Amino acid sequence: MPAEQVETAPVTDAAHRASFFRQSGWLMIATVTGGMFMTAVHLLSKALPVNSYGEFGVFLVVAMFIQGLPFQIVLAQQTAHALALGRGHELSGLIRAVWLGTFVVWLVGALAVLLFQGSILAHLKISDPAALWLALPMLLFTAWVPIFLGILQGQQNFLWMGWSLMSNGVGRVGVALFAVLVLHCHSSAMVAGMLGGLTASLVLAVWPTRSLWLAPAVPFGWSAVLRQAIPLALGFAAYNLLFTADTLLVKWYFTPAIAAFYLSAGTLARASMWLVGPLAAVMFPKLVHAKARAEKTDLLGVVLLGTLIFSAGGATGLWVLGPWVVKFMFTPDYVQAATALLPWYAWAVVPLALGNVLLNNLLAHSYFKVVPALCVLAVGYVVALAQFHATPVMVIKVLGSGNLLLLAVCAYYTWGGKKSKV
């Protein structure tokens, strides 16, 4: 498909809903399948020392933080907007600039890590230097995959987006399984699995977007891009901080064993996001496209209701079945500690899922007044975590409180506040 063209979305409400349910259904299947394979990696914790699994948790959380940086949402917004208005050649220049820019930043960071690797290994309590070395290309691909997933999302090419998501999970399990069981590696094996999965995912995301980034590029207006990209970046960075900061803090303040137990509970609780995340992911480019063409859509209510049903159902399931799930996923050492944390954690992420839907809606419509409030909330959340972390349950209570405030702020700007765009 030429870079400046995109399949026009249906304009009737019934057609919009039919397209939405078809695409979100496929993306949900792909996300859950990929997520199940990613969760299956944690079964290997039974073959790892507790400390090695805790070391893997460090790299996992850093990758989650980078993955949560707003590359995907910014590229999705820019792609959907550019294709709706027939500006594909400008988009090509933007994609190349972001691709090169992330590589340059990574290269500087990689050199710093290699220069100070002794201090980093000691401070993070990592005993396997190979894990750190493998983490460097893994983190680069962690930044690149969301860029091209965002392009696919903006194209509304959810078929290839789904295959890319699934390949990440399959590749992660396959490589990690071989490295742990055959090569008898520990944390480095788990990081190698992440690298293998990301490599497969990147290939399946880069290839179907080639018509856009290979197209002849024309100059694009940086000022116009930044006016959209900066508030998008800040808004979703604040959201991502609420999603990941608790695990980093637990690793910092608690013993490796407690951090491993907390990671196991968090991994299972966040699994509900696999069910609800695709709803917001499909909604976002459709709202951007509709806004660019001055079309109306009623997707927000549908997505919000679906998110509430799936997230609350998932939390209830983990509350009831938590002990069995932990026994199946982890060694007996984890059962008592992780089971005690799981109900708290499962319900703490429900308002986060609902807030994510409202935030996607606000930013798709360029209602950027919500962003300063979210930034203040994110800073307050980090301060609260630093002050109130006597026990893992207390950390989760702070997490749940922060997520409730996120939902309240997004709800206010959706229905109560004046929806100014700046």
Image (cartoon, grey):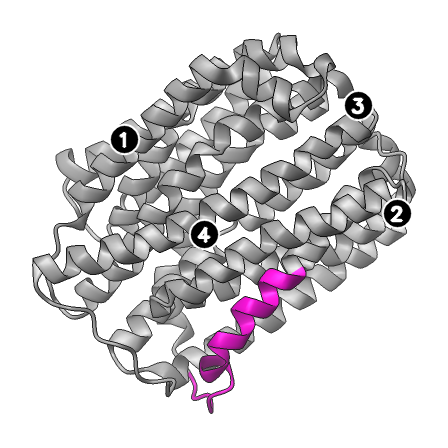
Image side of residue 7 versus residue 266, left or right: left
In terms of sequence position, does the residue under pointer 4 or pointer 3 come before the other? 4
Q: Nearer the viewer, residue 59 or 69?
A: 59
Q: What segment carries the magenta color?
A: 199-219
In terms of sequence position, does the residue under pointer 3 or pointer 2 come before the other? 3
Q: Amino acid at mark 3?
A: Val
CA separation in Å, label 1 and label 4: 20 Å
In terms of sequence position, does the residue under pointer 3 or pointer 1 come before the other? 3
Taking the spot 41% from the left edge, 78% from the top edge, the residue there is 91
Q: Chief secondary structure of the magenta span? A: helix
* Image marks 3 and 2: residues in contact by CB distance under 8 Å: no
CA separation in Å, label 4 and label 2: 31 Å
The x and y percentages for residue 180 are: 83, 41
Q: Nearer the viewer, mark 3 or mark 2?
A: 3
| Residue at disc 1, secondary structure | helix
Taking the spot 82% from the left edge, 58% from the top edge, the residue there is 111
In terms of sequence position, does the residue under pointer 1 or pointer 4 come before the other? 4
Q: Nearer the viewer, mark 4 or mark 2?
A: 4
Q: Is residue 420 above or below residue 57?
A: below
Q: Identify the disc placed on residue 308.
A: 1
Q: Which residue is mark 4?
A: 30
In terms of sequence position, does the residue under pointer 2 or pointer 1 come before the other? 2
CA separation in Å, label 4 and label 3: 31 Å
Q: Amino acid at mark 1?
A: Leu
The x and y percentages for residue 66 are: 59, 49
The x and y percentages for residue 415 are: 14, 36
Hey, which quadrant is residue 256 in on the image? top right
Residue 299 lies within the magenta run: no
| Residue at disc 4, secondary structure | helix
Taking the spot 43% from the left edge, 88% from the top edge, the residue there is 218
Q: Which residue is mark 2?
A: 130
Residue at the outermost bottom position: 216
